Image: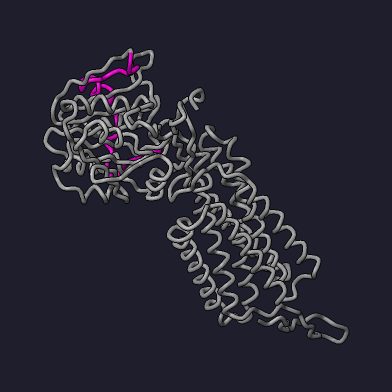
Amino acid sequence: MSTGTRGERQAVPGAEGVVATPIVAPTGLMPAVAAAIVFVASGAVLMLEILAVRLLAPYVGLTLETTTSIIGAVLAGIALGAAVGGWFADRRDPRRLLVGLLIGGGLLALLTVPIVRWLGPGARGHGDLAALGITVASLVPSAAVLSAVSPTVARLQLNDLHTSGTIVGRLSAFATAGALVGTFGTGFVVVPLMPVSTAVLGIGIALVIVGLVLGVSLRAFGRAAGAGAVAATIVLAALAATRDSPCDVETRYHCAVIEVSGSPTGRDLLLDNQHNSYIDLADPKVLQYSYTKWVARVVDASAPAGRPRNAVFVGGGGGTLPRWFVATRPGSHAEVLEVDDELITLDQERLGLKLSQALVAKVGDARTTVRKLPSGSADIVVGDAFSGLTVPWHLLTREWIADIRRVLKPGGLYILNLIDFRPNNLLKAELATLLPLFRDVQLMSFPAEDGLPAGGNEVIIASDTERAYPYDPAVDGANLYDRDEVEALAKGGTHLRDDFAPVDQLVSRPPMSLR
């Protein structure tokens, strides 16, 4: 690695005419070193972007708006860093600037976790602006500083106009390669192997180390500056490490918390800060949430008590309904389609889930795993993949429902737990999508004062056979809306299909009083 300077000459007026005066410009880095630096800096930015989705989810949910805020904030940081970094590189010693950017970017990365953990609890229930605010505060500074690395390296390397295109193109290619490796490495390797906060901590420390090594090689700072950088890294790393995680377990997709609730054997499973499942470790027949009781009533009404049935449960959660199903109908078979294998493991280790020939879990996105189920194999399909305001849009479309119909036996039941609030636009859209595909569509929901669905958990019942479902409003607290009433509710609803399913825009958040 060269640490010298390259000489250029500029003509300036002198006493005896024009005098050539040397301008000192820094010598460039070895090509491999320059490529490695932009590779690392760009990769770090993309890694932080992906990890931020996991950091923010416990506080603001995992919605399209959250993801959009994160992508937009990072892109804003990249644009800002590229512009401002290039400006400074033309006016400062790019060697010292480069070292400062790497160390500064690492220190800012270390601040990401504390910022999210400080601001996150106050953002709960305050909508998309809160998500955007936390994202900007936690990601834009580090993304901007690290994105200033590439123009600074380019300034160092550009010493011949005849090769400027080659140099800039090569650096751009390595920066893009770093972003690709950071993206795939984070999603396929880092997240499954370690907690998100640990990964962010590792990125920050690695960047500071790279900056310190480069600074020593280029003699770009003194001992005091180096010692200060090390001390700041230690302080911020300790701060990040001591900020309590809101999660008991970080699975591949969720921040999971388990709380004792109701009784010594009662457990509440929270996913991304939203109540997801209630489980009684001593009795799988216990159902706590109202919507699970509604589903149970519908299932019980579909066949005489105790008759074995085959059911598919889309979404595992804590496994409440699948366990209830096999416990109340011996000889039945239940298949659970769950995208998060680590959640299944958590259920087994801490929530008493016991898999067997009667209760099987199949890991993978339900859109792909359902295709492996035989046609006409299920008496009942229960859709229960919602978690708070996390909406699996691809499990609401006409194409998805076509697969459900294929799996159902003639006269089989499709029972869908959907979460929406007034004005219930998502509920209207799903009802409008289901009505042309099933002979009978009914709805169980808490009623508002006007008699229409109030929102919250809303259970849709669809079948090719008209059925009467017993319910007691005094006990269940719900209204049962028949097909005629459902058709009135669905008027103006958007028909959801794979090509157009704006469910994140249709779903309504709960009133402030319910958050």
- 220 horizontally vs 83: left or right: right
Q: From which residue to which does the magenta span run?
A: 475-504
- 514 horizontally vs 488: left or right: right
Q: Residue at x 73, y 68 (%)?
A: 92
Q: Is residue 83 visible?
A: no
Coloring scheme used: one colour
The residue nearer to you, when weighing 4 against 401, is 401
Question: What is the tally of numbered marks visible in this picture?
Answer: 0
- 299 horizontally vs 321: left or right: left
- Compared to residue 419, the image places residue 18 above or below, namely below
- Compared to residue 246, the image places residue 512 above or below, namely above
The location of residue 251, given as percent across then percent down, is 45, 49
Magenta stretch: residue 493 in it? yes
Task: State the residue lying farthest toward the right.
Answer: 15
- Compared to residue 494, the image places residue 116 above or below, namely below
Q: Quadrant of the N terminus?
A: bottom right
Q: Residue at x 24, y 47 (%)?
A: 370
The residue nearer to you, when weighing 399 against 405, is 405
Image quadrant assignment for residue 126: top right
- Compared to residue 503, the image places residue 451 above or below, namely above
The location of residue 282, given as percent across then percent down, is 38, 32
Magenta stretch: residue 477 in it? yes
Q: Residue at x 54, y 34 (%)?
A: 124
- 53 horizontally vs 361: left or right: right
Image quadrant assignment for residue 199: bottom right
Task: State the residue lying farthest toward the bottom.
Answer: 16
The location of residue 233, given as percent across then percent down, is 70, 59
The location of residue 142, given as percent across then percent down, is 62, 56
The residue nearer to you, when weighing 358 against 179, is 358
Q: Residue at x 11, y 36 (%)?
A: 410
Q: Is residue 153 visible?
A: yes
